[in-house]
Image (cartoon, rainbow, N blue to C red):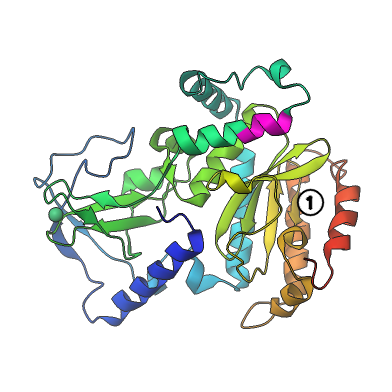
Amino acid sequence: MARCPCGARGSAFGAVALAASLPGFAIGVHVRHSGGQDGLQGTVTEAPLGTVDVQYKILEPSEMPIEVYHTNLGKQEYFENCLLRYTQVVEDYADKQLQALALEALDLEAASEDFRNASLWEGRHKERIGKLSNWFYNKYFSWLSGRTCGQCNVQMTSGGEHVVPTQDELEHGAHRVRLFKCPTCPNVSRFPRYKSLKKLLETRTGLCGEFARVFGLFLAALGYEYRLVLDWTDHVWNEVLIDSRWETVDTTCPGYNFKHILRWHMPVVYIVAFGAHEVLDVTARYATNWADVEARRGKDGNFDPKVAKQLIHEADERVRELRGETEPPQWRAQEAKDLDAMRLPGKL
Ligand SMILES: [Zn+2]
């Protein structure tokens, strides 16, 4: 199973470009809707296969929501939009009802380990988080892989096309809906990129963004200090504070937990951590060569890095303002020093 986000992105980009280049490709057409074939848990049961005609419209890249990565990377508006959206996700983690739903899921699905009982894990927090992450990856959340056409029993394919969301999808925060198509018949299957944590606790399916969003809620529910980390080259993961140190947790690839490394060696530009008390540029921790990062910032149509720094600073202050906090969190001074020490050429 291909789980590397950058690989998936590469193929999606090509297909969108191809679709955009074909005259008449991006106009509305009638197809048979493959209702109920998408295998999502907890979704509304749709009409049986082949009985409903729905109109769908494939979006051209210029019509896509701003969060679609490849058309907007490097633009200030996109950067600001991401800062705002991820701050919002982390705010949602404080919702006690959502936390209760996550704890219920632990009761129901994690019978072999008592993750909820903190006293059992005294002094073993890395082990607890490691096991929780493995459970999440192996038992709880599913990677969005290919879908099978119920009529033809063949693998449906996704060229990365996105379609207009329905009202119901929009209500659960899905501004993007990925389309899967059967190669031999007109059946399609939709994959809404839900933002609503409540909805994601039902669907339990997604890519790195959905994995990290939901796992962050589990960390919050168990009382940990948590951060959601966004790499602008298209990956999202978690960090958790253990023994005064921020540890990396990537539930799409638990083998890389607790290692500050990017496994696909993308040329990173910005990696920003969103926590309950802060927004912080943590690029230096994950970059292998700081001089390269600096050279990329502000180049190739990227906006002024001084502006980016200011925007992150403002987002950082805004998070604390919302919570009525006046001082940065107590770990900040040490972490700022550590990050400074990592801003060296040829770190590895
Ligand atoms: Zn088919």
Q: Is residue 308 above or below residue 189?
A: below
Residue 262 forms part of the magenta stretch:
no
Of residues 118 and 49, the one nearer the viewer is 118
- Seen in the image, is 103 located left or right of residue 148? right
Residue 141 on image: x %, y %: 45, 38
Residue 277 on image: x %, y %: 76, 42
Choose top left, top right, bottom left or bottom right for residue 142.
Answer: top left
User: Which residue does the numbered mark 1 point to in the structure image?
Assistant: 317
Work out which quarter of the rendered image holds the C terminus and state it. Answer: bottom right
Of residues 231 and 81, the one nearer the viewer is 231
Q: Quadrant of ligand 1?
A: bottom left
Residue 341 on image: x %, y %: 88, 61
The residue range painted magenta reads 125-130
Amino acid under disc 1: Glu
Question: Going 28% across and 65% down the picture, which residue do you hit?
Answer: 58
Can I make out residue 95 in this image?
Answer: yes
